[in-house]
Amino acid sequence: MPRLSLDDTDQAILKLLVQDARLSASEIGRRVGLSPAAAKRRIDRLEQLGIVTGYTATVDHAKLGGLIEAFVELRFDGSTKVGDIDRTFLDVPEVVEAFTTAGDPDALARVQVQDLDHLKQVIDKIRRTGRVTGTKTLIVLGGA
């Protein structure tokens, strides 16, 4: 896939959206020196090009109670294809995000579970795929 070239204004708009996706086109335009309409056109173009792929809310699950978040490092057999690593998480709804990585570990998954027993069940489910040769679990205590 060819790399897309963005000008400084597009880069500034992306930075603002990453910092706060709820900013209005008017506010973004004000901060980057564009009219609201021009800022909206640029945001729409970034979406159409697939550079901006969506918007999300970040939730403090600790305030909701009863949710544990953890990162699971996964190691796979050396002959495992990257596509097969990605498919490991398809049937695990507790996996919120998953990334294949270069080096050690081969993948990193962020999971959200109700309690430690649920975490054990999720890790066992991932291990049962037959592709995983090892895991390391890191429980999140807090975040910034």
Image (cartoon, helix red, strand yellow):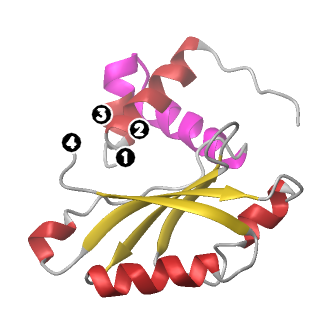
* Discs 1, 4 touching: Cβ within 8 Å: no
Q: Secondary structure at mark 2?
A: helix
* Residue type indicated by callout 2: Val
- Circle 4 is placed at which residue position? 144
Secondary structure of the residue carrying numbered label 1:
loop
Q: Are marks 2 and 1 in contact (CB under 8 Å)?
A: yes
Callout 3: SS: helix
- 93 lies above or below 3: below
Q: Nearer the viewer, mark 3 or mark 1?
A: 1
**Residue 46 magenta-drawn?**
yes
Which disc number belongs to residue 121? none
All told, the count of numbered labels is 4
Residue 31, magenta (yes or no): yes
Amino acid beneath label 1: Ala
| Residue of label 1 | 21
| Among the 4 quarters of the image, the one containing residue 3 | top right
Q: Is residue 1 above or below residue 121?
A: above
Between discs 2 and 4, the one toward the N terminus: 2
Residue that badge 3 annotates: 27
Q: Which of 99/30 is in front? A: 99
Q: CA distance from mark 2 to mark 4?
A: 15 Å
* Res 18 label: 2
Question: Looking at the picture, which amino acid does disc 3 mark?
Answer: Glu
Main SS category, magenta section: helix
Q: Which residues are magenta?
A: 29-48
Disc 2 crowd rating (10 Å Cα; few below 14, some 14-19, many 20+) is few
Q: Kindly identify the residue that appears in the image at 77 percent across and 27 percent down.
A: 4
- Depth check, mark 4 against mark 3: the one in front is 4
The image position of residue 121, as x and y in percent, is 45, 87
**Badge 4 element:** loop
